[in-house]
Image (cartoon, rainbow, N blue to C red):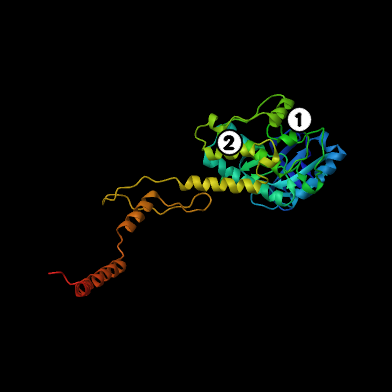
Amino acid sequence: MDESKTVTPILGNRYQLIQNIGNGGMAVVYHARDLMLERPVAIKVLRQDYSRNEAFRERFRTEAKAAANLSHPNIVTVHDFGFDSDRLYLVMEYVPGTDLKTILKERVRLPVEEAVNITIQAAAGIGYAHRAGLIHCDVKPHNILVTPDQRVKVTDFGIARAMASIQPDEKHDVVWGSPLYFSPEQASGAAPSPASDVYSLGVVLYELITGRLPFHSSDPAELARMHREAAPVPPRRLNPDVPLALEQIVMKVLAKEPSARYRTADQLGRVLSSFLQSMETIKVTPLQDSGPTSAPRQHASPNSNGFPLQPASEITEVEEEESINIDWGTTGLALATFVAVGGLIPFWLWIWFTFNPPTP
């Protein structure tokens, strides 16, 4: 039975379901309207087999409360949580745009700068969650939304784990997350950490810049083994346009041991921001002719991170001005010193010949 077509039109006597906008393995997402506040919302309705499981319901309720406390420009806000018609649901901020996986299906891969910008924004949201004590545990392009004005929103904290609830030695037979994107420790059923989200972000970035996943198999068990043991193909072999510095960052992020990666998404975001700044700084504008027909000079515009870039033409002009700018004060002082010293020469010659008369 298609659950997306057999739903209660209004949930909790408040939320009117309008349109199915997404289907996942565990839930269906709808564009809906909050009749009380008269605003659009997105509602994730869990499928019945999950909603009927008491242990899962309690865990989902606990994690939903934690996610609802997150307030960040790069995180989809959770408004409400409820249970109606034997189904658990989450009410979230409605974000216009599309998810990153849909964008990849259309474009295969993205230019390096665009891919890094998206990852930086996603890392900012996930890093905020880390500081708030939450691990996302399911970072993937499907859960990264991109708005028409290129803002990134991370969504689906439905299986997030509160760090305070995690035991270092815990083991699970059931592995939560997406096999294509989860970390080696998640693949082995071990406790996740912020570095687990960093690994998943690295898989997303790898896919954005190469158009391929580092590991792919139709067998979930084989995928788990590859995450734990196999080495990914370096990105530059798949896309020569990837800078070496970015490849090194990605390979570090995809390390098997959590301690070998960047520890938090904030740290990864800072590293990528520094890389992007250096990448944009070395970009130069072709030098314009200085003749009377040349175009007027353009003022430097800020880059995507707000750092102003100085065109090469302006840098060259400054260097030329400095090269012909004579410091007349210093020059005059040097000339005066030379004249003064030169004027003492006859005096010193007279002293010399007085005490050392020439022999006849």
Q: Give the left or right position of residue 288, taking residue 243 as reference.
A: left
Q: Nearer the viewer, mark 1 or mark 2?
A: 2
Q: Residues within 10 Å of mark 1 (few under 14, many from 20)?
A: few
Location of residue 193 (image quadrant): top right
What's the mark number on residue 208? 2
Report the residue that reaches farthest toward the left.
Answer: 360
**In the figure, 25 relative to 83: above or below?**
above
Q: Residues within 10 Å of mark 2 (few under 14, many from 20)?
A: many
Say which residue appears at 86% left-offset and 40% top-offset. 55
Location of residue 81 in the rendering, given as x and y in whole percent from the top left corner: 79, 47
Q: Are marks 1 and 2 in contact (CB under 8 Å)?
A: no
Residue type of the residue flagged with mark 2: Leu
Residue 211 placement (x, y as % from top left): 57, 31
Side of 278 where 61 appears, left or right: right
The residue depicted at 32 percent of the width and 56 percent of the height is: 323
Tell me what residue is drawn at x 81 percent, y 33 percent: 174
Hey, which quadrant is residue 145 in on the image? top right
Question: Up-down: is 236 above or below 60?
Answer: above
Which element is circle 2 on? Answer: helix
Residue 128 position, x and y percent, is 68, 51
Q: Which residue is mark 1?
A: 2
Does residue 322 appear left or right of residue 342 in this picture?
right
Q: CA distance from mark 1 to mark 2?
A: 32 Å
Question: Which residue in the rendered view is the most extreme toward the right?
Answer: 54
Location of the N terminus by quadrant is: top right
The quadrant in which residue 346 appears is bottom left
From the image, which quarter does the C terminus lie in? bottom left
Residue 276: percent from left, percent from top: 53, 45
For the residue pair 13 and 193, the one nearer the viewer reads as: 193
